[in-house]
Image: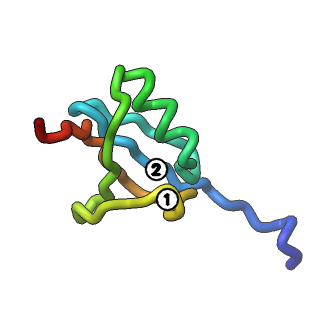
C-alpha cells in the first residue's frame, strides 16, 4: 500500500481566549495566534499550553490546545 492510499484525519487544535474556544484545523501558526489576539482587541499577551507552560513564537506551528492571556505590565 502506498502513502497516497492512506487517509489521515487532521487533528483539531484549540485556542482559548477570554473563555472563548476557537477550533483550528491542524496546526496553529504564530500568525494565527496574532490574528486571534488582534480580533479580541489584545495587543500584548502571553501564550500558554494546556499544562500552563509559556510558549514562544519559536514553538509554532503547534498542535493541541493553547491559551492566550492578556499581558498587563506592572505600573
The reply, left or right, for residue 14 in relation to residue 69 is right
**SS at badge 2:** strand
**SS at badge 1:** loop
| Residue at x-position 57% and y-position 57% | 61
How much space separates mark 1 and mark 2, taking CA atoms? 6 Å
Q: Hey, which quadrant is residue 43 in on the image? A: top left
Q: Position of residue 4 (x, y in %)?
A: 86, 65
Name the residue nearer the viewer: 56 or 12. 56
Q: Which mark is residue 63?
A: 1
User: Quadrant of the image for the N terminus?
Assistant: bottom right
| Residue at x-position 34% and y-position 50% | 47
Q: Hey, which quadrant is residue 32 in on the image? A: top right
Q: Position of residue 21 (x, y in %)?
A: 32, 36
User: Quadrant of the image for the C terminus?
Assistant: top left
Residue beneath disc 2: 13
Name the residue at the front extreme.
75
Name the residue at the left extreme.
75
Q: Earlier in the sequence, mark 1 or mark 2?
A: 2
Crowding at mark 2 (Cα within 10 Å: few <14, some 14-19, many 20+):
some
The reply, left or right, for residue 13 in relation to residue 9 is left
Q: Which mark is residue 6?
A: none
Name the residue nearer the viewer: 75 or 1. 75
Q: Position of residue 57 (x, y in %)?
A: 50, 56
The reply, left or right, for residue 33 in relation to residue 5 is left
Name the residue nearer the viewer: 67 or 65. 67
| Residue at x-position 83% and y-position 72% | 3
| Residue at x-position 60% and y-position 54% | 10
Q: Position of residue 44 (x, y in %)?
A: 34, 36
Q: Are marks 1 and 2 in contact (CB under 8 Å)?
A: yes
Name the residue nearer the viewer: 60 or 3. 60
Amino acid at each position: 500500500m502506498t502513502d497516497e492510499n492512506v487517509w489521515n484525519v487532521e487533528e483539531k487544535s484549540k485556542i482559548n481566549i477570554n473563555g472563548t474556544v476557537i477550533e483550528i484545523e491542524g496546526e496553529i501558526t504564530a500568525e494565527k495566534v496574532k490574528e486571534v489576539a488582534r480580533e479580541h482587541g489584545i495587543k500584548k499577551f502571553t501564550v500558554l499550553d494546556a499544562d500552563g507552560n509559556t510558549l514562544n513564537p519559536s514553538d509554532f506551528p503547534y498542535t493541541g490546545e493553547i491559551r492566550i492571556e492578556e499581558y498587563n505590565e506592572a505600573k
